[in-house]
Image (cartoon, grey):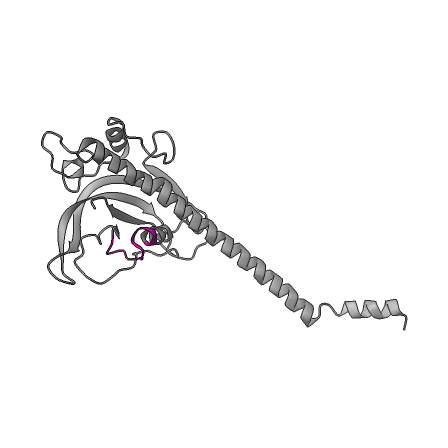
Amino acid sequence: MPAHVSARSRRAHGFTLVEMSVVLVIVALLIGAVSVGRDVYRSAQAERFGSDFVQAWVLAYDRYVAGTGGVPGDDFDNPTGYVNASSGNFLCGNELLNALLQRGIEVPAGRGEGLGDRYVAQDSHGQPHEVRVCFGNVSWAEPYGAVGSYSARARNVMRLRGLTPELANQLDQRIDGRVDARHGRLREIDQQASTSAQPAIWSRQETDGLNGGSNDPDAQVAEVHAYLRMDQ
């Protein structure tokens, strides 16, 4: 049989097991590289959110306190020590921005001019979420009297609405060194005054959908809301 006929005959049988194995290994490596790249991107995004937005607002608040001797929105003639002079009454939007600007405090960049209280982050599906910041005073559980015993105190906080679960977990790890929605300086709203000594996970997961359902790759993921304690 001619050599060229024999070669065509061998090629007609398709890939060998070795060739198929090599192809599968290459595909697996490519998928892994894409997954790692996506994780690195989201981690970098969380780092930027923490430094460019959350930390920027912490510094703006601290500059206000250092420069005025009071907290934003309080009555300087009859100070209470509470943001907006009362508990549960939050300072948000233009009212917050103007309170800082009137005292010569630079407002974080946020989304742009007049939108310094907002930040847009992407979830794991690539969908956008707008995080908004406010300041206020809430009841806050702290250790008191004995190990495992807690008592509530009034504390000034930054409120962060619109966090993705992934962003909340990464921010919690960055601020407190662990993920716990009930304890530490960053807590989920409705957990901040809990007197339970048991840790808690964040109430929503990245697989939860914003409007119900789960695991829809095209839908926005669920959001959680948090308080960051400002008083040291």
Total numbered labels: 0
Residue 129 visible here: no
Q: Position of residue 110 (x, y in %)?
A: 36, 36
Q: Position of residue 228 (x, y in %)?
A: 26, 47
Residue 201 visible here: yes
> Which image quadrant is residue 197 in?
bottom left
Q: What residue range appears in magenta?
A: 173-184
Q: Residue furthest front?
A: 66
Whether residue 177 appears in magenta in the rendering, the answer is: yes
Q: Residue furthest bottom?
A: 1
Whether residue 155 appears in magenta in the rendering, the answer is: no
In-front residue for pair 49/208: 49
User: Which residue is at 83% across, 68% downward?
Assistant: 7
Tell me: residue 64, above or below residue 164: above
Most frequent secondary structure within the magenta stretch: loop
Q: Position of residue 71 (x, y in %)?
A: 19, 36
User: Which residue is at 57% across, 61% downward?
Assistant: 29
Tell me: residue 81, above or below residue 36: above
Q: Quadrant of the image for the N terminus?
A: bottom right
User: Which residue is at 39% across, 48% downward?
Assistant: 46
Tell me: residue 130, above or below residue 144: above
Q: Position of residue 232 (x, y in %)?
A: 21, 46
Q: Residue furthest left?
A: 78
**Left or right of 36: which side holds 108?**
left
